[in-house]
Image (cartoon, rainbow, N blue to C red):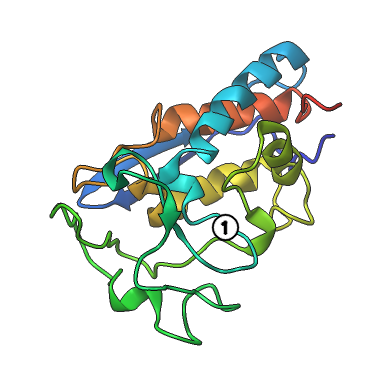
Amino acid sequence: MRQFAIGLLAAFTIASAASAAETEVSIIPPAEGSVSIEDGLDAFSRVYEVASHPRCSNCHVGADNRPMWSGPSYGRTRAHGMNINAGDSRIGAETIQCSTCHAYREGLNDMPHAAPQVAMNWQLAPVEAEWFGKTSDEICNQLRDPDRNGGRTMLELAEHLNHDLILHWAWNPGGGREAAPYSLQEHIDDLLIWGVSGFPCASD
């Protein structure tokens, strides 16, 4: 499956603020035809490590609209405390907004057990992007499906990773939380390798 934007080989260098520091991310796809399916599958295995990590999957939940608490800092896996439900709005507009605790904040909130805060509105990912508890193959097929990935091309997926500060937070979560594996740049590189190889999934 190939849904590459015109100018696939163009280099995109975009600077954005992540927490209190600046993170420079280069969006430079490999040359088309230069990546084997095997290498693409290998790259996606690393993409899955990130997508299934608590820093990402805890807010990529299903239609029950309940974020999760999981990972080493939480002790055990369970639904978000205080009976939080983000509602169909995915921002808590129907009950209590996510931003009540996950307030807009410039810089890190490093206090252990304090609510994470970044310089944008906190919210759950769309239901179509449910990742929590999903297999590698399920997430692979979701990410390459324009009906479930926001209609994004490979480059648009990479750009989404670059500009969304909630996603940047996953690699610098503070408060004693375990960061997502690899780095934002390595994750984007793996996404591009997977895309140039044709978005292969194990079920193909």
Q: Residue at x 40, y 80 (%)?
A: 97
Q: How many marks?
A: 1
Q: Type of residue at label 1?
A: Val
Is 128 rendered above or below residue 88? above
* Neighbours of disc 1 within 10 Å: few (<14), some (14-19), many (20+): many
| The N terminus - image quarter | top right
Q: Nearer the viewer, residue 88 or 12?
A: 88
- Give the x, y percent position of residue 72: 31, 38
Q: Residue at x 41, y 35 (%)?
A: 184
Q: Nearer the viewer, residue 50 or 68?
A: 68
Disc 1: which residue: 61
Residue 56 can be seen in this image: yes
- Give the x, y percent position of residue 31: 68, 20
- In screen coordinates, is 104 left or right of 159? left
Q: Give the SS element for disc 1.
A: loop
**Going by the picture, which residue comes out furthest to the bottom?**
94
Q: Nearer the viewer, residue 179 or 2?
A: 179
Is 118 rendered above or below residue 84? above
Q: Residue at x 20, y 52 (%)?
A: 20
- Give the x, y percent position of residue 157: 61, 46
Residue 14 can be seen in this image: no
Quarter of the image for residue 172 reads top left
Q: Residue at x 49, y 74 (%)?
A: 86
Is 165 rendered above or below residue 100? above
- In screen coordinates, is 127 left or right of 69? right
| The C terminus - image quarter | top right
Q: Nearer the viewer, residue 86 or 171?
A: 86
- Give the x, y percent position of residue 192: 62, 30
- In screen coordinates, is 1 left or right of 39? right
